[in-house]
Image: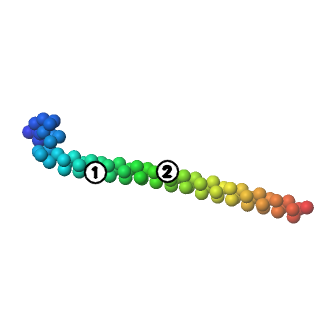
Amino acid sequence: MNPAFHSWAAFFAMGGYAFYVWLAAAVTLLSLFSLWGYTWWQHKQLFADIQRRQARELRIRQANQTQHSARSQEKQQ
């Protein structure tokens, strides 16, 4: 089996097409890392939103229970 390139310099030169090959590789990697970062950021935002909603619902339930118990006490008096 013969190697495609005989030296590292030949590998990096890519047969004279190095600019296009490495530019394409860089754009691809930049796009993938950007997509990964955006997805990770959205994941964090989604979980923060879920936590805020759950905390709000808990506060609403507690407030309703407090009002209900206050009304019950008023009726007993």
Q: Amino acid at mark 2?
A: Lys
Of badges 1 and 2, nearer the viewer stands 1
Quadrant including the N terminus: top left
Locate residue 41, reporting x and y percent: 45, 51
Q: As drawn, which residue projects farthest toward the front? A: 19
Whether residue 75 sits left or right of residue 64 in the image: it is right
Name the image quarter holding residue 53.
Answer: bottom right
Rate crowding at label 1 as few (under 14), some (14 to 19) or many (20 or more) other CA atoms within 10 Å.
Answer: few
Whether residue 35 sits left or right of residue 71 in the image: it is left
Q: Amino acid at mark 1?
A: Val
Residue under pointer 1: 27
Instruction: Pick the residue in front: 43 or 71.
Output: 43
Residue 3, compared with residue 77, is above or below; it is above
Residue occupying image coordinates x 55% and y 55% = 49
Whether residue 7 sits left or right of residue 76 in the image: it is left
Locate residue 33, reporting x and y percent: 35, 48
Residue occupying image coordinates x 64% and y 57% = 56
Which of marks 2 and 1 precedes in the sequence? 1
- Provide the secondary structure element on which disc 1 rests: helix
Distance from the alpha carbon under mark 1 to that under mark 2 = 26 Å
Residue under pointer 2: 44
Residue occupying image coordinates x 87% and y 62% = 74
- Provide the secondary structure element on which disc 2 rests: helix
Name the image quarter holding residue 15.
Answer: top left
Residue occupying image coordinates x 91% and y 61% = 77
Q: As drawn, which residue projects farthest toward the bottom? A: 75
Locate residue 5, reporting x and y percent: 11, 39
